[in-house]
Image (tube, helix red, strand yellow):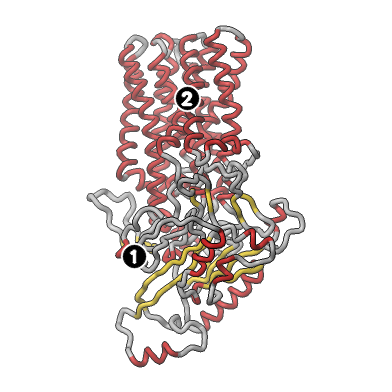
Amino acid sequence: MSGAPRDAVEGAGRRRRRRGRGEQAVVPDAEFASYYGRPILKRPRWRPLDIAGYLALGGLAGASSLLAAGADATARPALARTAKLGAAGAISLSLAALVHDLGRPSRFLNMLRVVKPTSPMNLGSWLLAGYAPLTMAAAAADVAGRYRAVGAAATASAAALGPAVATYTAVLVSDTAVPAWHGGRRDLPFVFAGSGATAAAGLALVAAPGEETGPARRMAVLGAVLELGAFQLMKRRLGLVAEPYEEGRPRAMLRAAEALTAGGAALAVCAGRRGRARAVLAGTALLAGSTAMRLAVFHAGVASAEDPKYTVVPQRERLEARSRDGDGRP
Amino acid sequence: MTDDIARAAGHTDPPPRMGFFTDTSVCIGCKACEVACKEWNAIPEDGLELTGMSYDNTQGLGADTWRHVAFVEQRRPLGGAASGAGDVDVFDAARDLAPAPGNGELRWLMSSDVCKHCTRAACLDVCPTGSLFRTEFGTVVVQEDICNGCGYCVTACPYGVIDQRPGDGRAWKCTLCYDRLGVGMEPACAKSCPTDSIQFGPLEELRERAADRVAQLRAAGVDDARLYGEDPEDGVGGDGAFFLLLDEPEVYGLPPDPVVSTRDLPTMWRHAAAAAASLAALAVVSFAGRPR
C-alpha cells in the first residue's frame, strides 16, 4: 500500500471539508461521508508524460494528416512534406509512449489478440495499426519522390483516419470511473479535436515556409476556438467535478494552455506570410499549448480520482434525484 | 437467471453463478479472510504499515490485497445494533449498569471488502487484450499470462478494486478462488471466516438468504441494515459479491451509486464521431479560405 491516509484523525463519519488558500468555490462545499478520507477509486497508474504525450501526439498526428492531404490537393509541397513527416513522427512517438507505459511492454502485441468493441483501447490499437503505416508510407513516398500514386493513396487514407485518431483518445479516457474524465465524455472529444488542430497548425508554422501556411494559420484559429470553447462547455457541465481542473497543478497547466493556445493563434494571424520568426514563435506556443491542455486534463483526472468527494457527492445527488422522482433507475 | 452472463460469455451449460454474501453485522474484524486469501493465492507481502487511523493497517483493496477488513469507529445511539438480532442479552444488561452518554455509545463497524465480480464489469469491458474474462461461474478473472499491464482496468473499476502490482506490472485482483471453485471447494476467505460473515454459494440462494437476514435485523430494531450490490437493476447490473451494511456505503469506502462506464460508450462514440467530423470540416474550411 502506498501513501499515508489523509485526514486519518477525522475518522469515518460525516464531515464538512474546508478548502485552503481562500479559493473561490465553484459549487458550495459538499458534506459527505468517507472512509477516513481515503479515495474510493484507484489512482490511475498511467504515467503522466507517457499518456498525456500519447494523447497530444495522437492529436498532432491525426490533424497533420488532414493538413497533408489538403496541402497535396492545393499544391503546397513544403506544407505537405512537413505535415506528412509530422504525422509519421508523432504517431511513432505516440505508439512508443503507449508501449513504454505498459507494465509488460513486451506483451504490447496482445492488444491485437482480440477485436473488442467494448474496449476503446483495443479499437484504438487497431486504428493505430492501420493508421501508422499509412502515415509512414505517405512520408516515405514524399521524401523519396517516387511511388506517387501509392503516396497519394496513403496520404488520402491517413487523412480519412486522422480525425478518428485525434478524437478516439477522448473516448479512451472518458470510458473510466475517473469523475473528471467520465463527466467530460460529451465535450472532451471536441477539446481533443481542437487541440489536435492547433498542434498540427503549430508544427506547420514552425517548419513550413510562410507562403504555404495560410491554411495552418486558419486551422490554428479555428482549432483554438473549438478547443477552448468546448473546454468551457465541459467545465459548466461538470459542476462540482470541474473543481479539480481549477485547483493546484491542473489549474496552472490549464492557464498555460489557454494563454499559449489563444496567444499562439493570435500571433499566427499577425505573423502573416512573412513574419518567419513570429510564425515559429506562434507555432511553438501552439504546440506547447496543446501539450499543456492534455497534461491539465490528465492531472485533473488523477486529482478527481484521489478525492472521494468527487466520487461520493455526485453519486449521492444522483441517488437523491432518483428517490425524488420516484424510483427511476440509472 | 443469474447464469445468463456465463452463457453470454460463451460457456455452454454453465454451473449456477457463484458469489459472496458478506454479512458485515457478524464480522468481528479478525482478518482471517485477509490472511487466508494471501496464503492460498500466494500474494506477495506489500508492506507492514501502521496507519494510526484504526485497527485497519491494510487500508484498502489492491493488487496484493484481495480481501480487506475495514474498521469504522462511530459514536451513535445503538438501538438494537449492539445485540444484533440474536438472543444475546449481555449488552442490555450492560446498558442497565452504565447509562449511555448523550452522544451515543461507541460502535465498531467491520466489513470485509472484496472484488464485486460485477454483472456488467467495467474492468472486463475495457481490457484491450482479453486478459480479463468471465468464468463459467459468472466471476471475473485476470489471465496473468495475457495481461500486458496497460492499466485501463485500474481506471475503469468504479469500486477501486483492481490494481497494478509494482515491479510486476500486471493487474491483479480477487479470482473468487477460481482454482478452488473448479474442484468444488469454497474460496479461502469464506472457508476461514469464523462467524460466517463471508458466505459463499449460488448467487440466487445468497440473495434469498440476505433478504431474510435484513428482515431479521430490521425486525430487531437495526434500522440501518441494508443490502449493497444485490440489486440486478443497479448501475453495474448487480454484484456477484454483495454486502449487508449497517451504514451508508461510503462510510465503508464503497461508492454509493457505482455505474459501469461502458454503459455510456455509445454516447461517447457518437460525440467522438461528431468531433471527428468537426475536425475534418475545420480542415476543409482552413483550405477553402482565401488562397495564400
- Give the spatial CA distance, label 1 vs label 2: 47 Å
Whole-percent x and y of residue A89?
A: 48, 22
- Residue drawn at the location 36% of the way across and 73% of the way down: B74
Left or right of residue B8: residue A298: left
Question: Is A65 situated above or below A309?
Answer: above
Quarter of the figure with the C terminus of chain A? bottom right
Query: In this figure, which residue is indicated by the disc labeled 2?
Result: A90
Q: Amino acid at mark 2?
A: Ala
Direction top: furthest residue: A145
Q: Quadrant of residue B82?
A: bottom left
Query: In this figure, which residue is indicated by the disc labeled 1?
Result: B53
Query: Which chain is home to disc 2?
Result: A
Q: Residues within 10 Å of mark 2 (few under 14, many from 20)?
A: many
- Residue drawn at the location 56% of the way across and 22% of the way down: A159
Whole-percent x and y of residue A288?
A: 36, 27
Q: Nearer the viewer, residue B68 or A176?
A: B68
Quarter of the figure with the N terminus of chain A? bottom left
Question: Is B261 situated above or below A83?
Answer: below
Question: Label 1's element?
Answer: loop
